[in-house]
Image (spheres, rainbow, N blue to C red):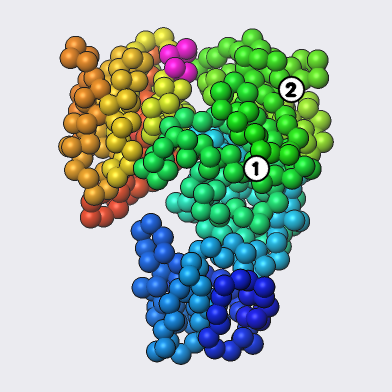
Amino acid sequence: MKLKKLFKDIKNIEIKGSKDIEISGIAIDSRAVFPNSLFIAKKGNKFDGSKFIYDAKNAGASAILTDIFDPFLNIAQIIHKNPAEIEADISARYYENPSKDLFSIAITGTSGKTTTSYLIKHVFDDNEKSLGVIGSLGHFTGKKLILSDLGTPQSADLQKYLKEMVVNKLDSFCMEATSIGIDQNRIKNIDFDVAIFTNLTHEHLDYHKTFSIYKEAKKKLFSNLSNKSFAILNIDDENSLDMVEKSVSKIITYSCKKQADFEAKGICFSIEGSYFTLVHNKKSYLVSAKLIGKFNVYNILAAVACATLKRIPIENIIKSINSFDSISGRLEKINIKKPFHVFIDYAHKEDALKNVLETLREVKKSNIITVFGCGGQRDTFKRPKMAKVAQDLSDITIVTSDNPRTEDPLKIIDEIKVGFSNNYNYFSEPDRYKAIEMALNIAKEDDIVLIAGKGHETYQILKDKTIEFDDKKVCIEIAKKL
């Protein structure tokens, strides 16, 4: 695409250099630049793209979108006071607005986004409705899985992934719409057919500062829906109706407690799964899922509601739900061939930990041993609160390191320990491997060991390096030694 076409009608820009050059791609990371691509030199929370302009040029970039003109840079420059502000517009134009050719689903909420998206994928794929996924476990575009540390990618990457889905002839896509991604307009210019609200609790306050600002970011997704779109709401969450306060979309509800379009009744659990009656349009259907926990019942209801919008028969949907196995790092049971049970989960905030532990308490026959830590450079207020949750719902707790980043792990542990009462039975072991080893050594027959905080992650972020660390592999390795 010609540079002049790419930036046609984009306001408040000045182009220095030839407007007739051909642009063959858009990159926001200088390491991803290839010949004749446009490099967007924007400022982020961690990096300033302007510092990598010459790296981009040396890699073959033919144009730079930046905020300050450099007279010594001998390639085309597009000057805008805030390059990030127009990233979504030029990206959607370059990739030809791919969401228009896909049935588009966004999931937002504090918890449940990942599991719900993969439930939807499983149901769609099972019923010949091929679906791509954008989320925290990676981005599946039809032929490959692209690993990423962003649940909601930057606009340039997101539009590229959607274009790949169109090229690969996918029918639909489902994405995790994080509050930060929404706030930074990463999902701008995507026409969502469906937006799902799971729940809302305190998170990302290191970024948003207040709960009300965090909530407003979520609401923005629903405010931008068209009157042809659907908002699927968990009405058991007190914030659900606030989400659609300014939305013109059609509303579908689901609940475990109230009258709704999709209701779960007679819920019961075992160590092997969840069982309940789904009520929809005055008809009842038995669900026998392999996922454990009430929060997963909510995830299932959201997925079922979404799948009906693609006119998949509800009997087929439930058959697919019942065949779905656990998702990586989300209350995932680890097969260690021991007389006790081990689960790993991504729960790294108080409400998520509370949900998981309450679920395990419903199926436990003996003690629950919890291993958890808190990440560095993240919300510090949750640290003692997570200790209180662990104390209330576990028989034994071992506090350890999560991803300490640049913080002192011992300091983080000390801040967690403030939440324990003086008479509670807990241990602290900053070495995560040794903490897990301690838990498995303590465990007796029918005990449940929960290792929380990292879930699917295969690394640990320390002060000066990132090391390989996979809770699942570590559990299996230690279990073989017992």
Mark 2, Cα crowd under 10 Å, few <14 / some 14-19 / many 20+, is: some
| Image position of 259 (left or right of 138) | right
Where in the figure is residue 307, as x and y percent of width and height?
Answer: 73, 35
Magenta span dominant secondary structure: helix
| Image position of 221 (left or right of 81) | right
Q: Is residue 340 visible?
A: no
Nearest-to-viewer mark from 1 and 2: 1
Q: Amino acid at mark 1?
A: Ser
Which residue is at the front of the view, 403 or 210?
210
**Residue for point 33% across, 26% down:** 386
* Residue 204 is one of the magenta-drawn residues: no
Q: CA distance from mark 1 to mark 2?
A: 22 Å
**Residue for point 64% across, 40% down:** 222
Which residue is at the front of the view, 9 or 1?
9
Instruction: Give, as a single range, the part of the protein colored magenta.
Output: 358-363
List the residue tagged with mark 2.
Answer: 261
